[in-house]
Image (cartoon, rainbow, N blue to C red):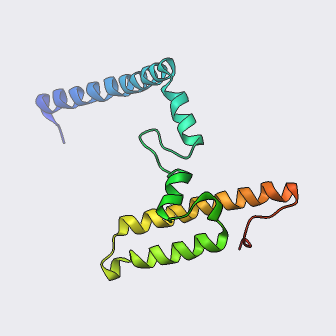
């Protein structure tokens, strides 16, 4: 089946456009990467990733905020106290009971972070021969 002269011209135009884009897009991407390296954006992204955050925003809450969410002080932060406060506030903010999923998520993230904190603190104290309250499970 013959395309005719108009079909051939259209096909050649499409092929020309595709070939131009195939060369231009990688070059533009390379230039963008070079600009990011010059401005230090790649270093900022890697530092943010190390701290648990994304380049666009903060992904984790701070230890102080986690303590506030669970209504604990740093001295009260034991495995049992964290678990007790977690169960209390997680249940109180249950969506089925008309609570807030956002607050429930905050409570969960606070417990997650404080569990890590207690675990690190226990490991640190084990080196010194002491142990912070509670057993890790």
Q: Nearer the viewer, residue 84 or 33?
A: 84
Q: Residue at x 26, y 26 (%)?
A: 17
Give the number of marks.
0
Judge from the rendering whether residue 6 lies leftward or rightward of residue 48; answer left or right: left
Q: Of 11 and 34, which appears nearest the observer? A: 34
Q: Quarter of the image containing the N terminus?
A: top left
116 with respect to 36 (left or right): right
- At 16% from the left and 36% from the top, the residue drawn is 3
| Looking at the image, residue 47 lies above or below residue 100 | above
Q: In screen coordinates, is 2 left or right of 71?
A: left
Q: Is residue 109 above or below residue 93?
A: above
Which image quadrant is residue 25 in?
top left
Q: Residue at x 52, y 58 (%)?
A: 66
Relative height, residue 16 to residue 87 (above, below): above
Q: Quadrant of the C terminus?
A: bottom right
Q: Within the image, what quadrant is residue 115 found in?
A: bottom right
Residue 40 in percent (x, y) is at 51, 23
Q: Position of residue 49 (x, y in %)?
A: 55, 41
- x 57%, y 43%: residue: 51
* Residue ranking furthest to the top: 38
Horizontal and vertical percent for residue 84? Answer: 57, 76
Nearer to us in this view, 1 or 82: 82
Side of 32 relative to 21 (left or right): right
Query: Where residue 130 sits in the image (x, y, percent)?
Result: 83, 61
């Amino acid at each position: 089946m013959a395309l005719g002269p108009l079909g051939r011209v259209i096909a050649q135009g499409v092929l020309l456009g595709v070939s131009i884009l195939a060369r231009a897009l990688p070059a533009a991407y390379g230039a963008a990467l070079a600009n990011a390296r010059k401005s230090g954006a790649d270093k900022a992204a890697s530092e943010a990733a190390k701290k648990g955050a994304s380049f666009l925003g903060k992904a984790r809450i701070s230890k102080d905020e986690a303590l506030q969410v669970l209504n604990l002080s740093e001295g009260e932060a034991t495995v049992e106290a964290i678990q007790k406060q977690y169960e209390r506030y997680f249940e109180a903010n249950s969506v089925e009971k008309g609570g807030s999923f956002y607050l429930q998520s905050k409570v969960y993230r606070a417990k997650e972070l404080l569990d890590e904190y207690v675990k690190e603190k226990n490991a640190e104290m084990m080196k010194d021969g002491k142990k912070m309250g509670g057993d890790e499970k």
